[in-house]
Amino acid sequence: MSVGWSTDFVVLDGERPAAEGMRRAEESFADWVLVQREHGRYWYVYAFEEFRAQPGLAHGVWAVGALETMPLSHALNLHETESSQAVGDRALADTAPVLPAGRRPSAARFVELAADGTPLSVGGADVAPPASRRGRRPSAGRRGRPSG
C-alpha cells in the first residue's frame, strides 16, 4: 500500500500528564496526534479519533483525578513494539507495512523527522493530506517540539 503524508498534527510529550495531552489534542484541531516517548526515541502516530477512543483515556478507568498526574504514555499503555517508524526521508517509506494482528495502528505508520529530530510529517496507508476530517476548522499544522 502506498503511504500518504500529513503535516496536520500535534506533538504530545508522553511523560506529561494524560489530561494535559488530551486537552492539547482537542484544542489543536489537528487530524493526527503524535505522541513522543523517551525524548523522541519512540513515536506513536494516532488519528485524532483513535487517540480519543483509547481505553486508558476514558473516564472511569482510573481513580478520579488520576489522569491529571499520570503520564500520557502510562495511560495509553505504550510499548516499543507498537511505535511508529521514524524516517529521515519520505522516500524510505514508500510502502506501508502490513499491520500484524493484535497490534495498534500506530505500528503501521511513520513519522518523518528533520536532522535535528523535529517531526515534519506523519505518514501511513490511511494518512491523507489535511482535510479536517473532524468537521471542525482546519489547523495550520502543529509541527515542532511539544510544550511542557
Image (cartoon, rainbow, N blue to C red):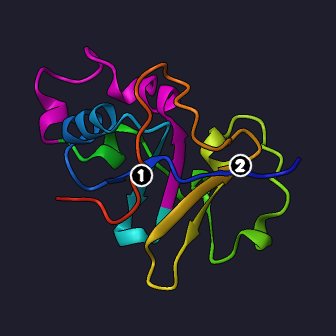
Percent coordinates x, y for residue 101 in the rendering = 77, 36
Q: What's the residue type where badge 1 is placed?
A: Val
Q: Residue type at mark 2? A: Gly
Badge 1 marks a residue whose secondary structure is: strand
Q: Residue at x 56, y 59 (%)?
A: 121
Residue 49 horizontal side relative to residue 142, left or right = right
Q: Report crowding for label 2: few under 14, some 14 to 19, many 20 or more residues within 10 A (C-alpha).
A: many
The residue that disc 2 covers is 124
Examine the rendered structure and indicate whether residue 76 appears above or below residue 4: above
Rendered image: mark on residue 35: 1
Q: Give the residue at the far right of this rendering.
A: 1
Magenta segment: 43-69
The CA span between labels 1 and 2 is 15 Å
* Quarter-of-image position of residue 116: bottom left
Residue nearest the observer in this picture, 137 or 118: 137
Q: Residue at x 42, y 69 (%)?
A: 40
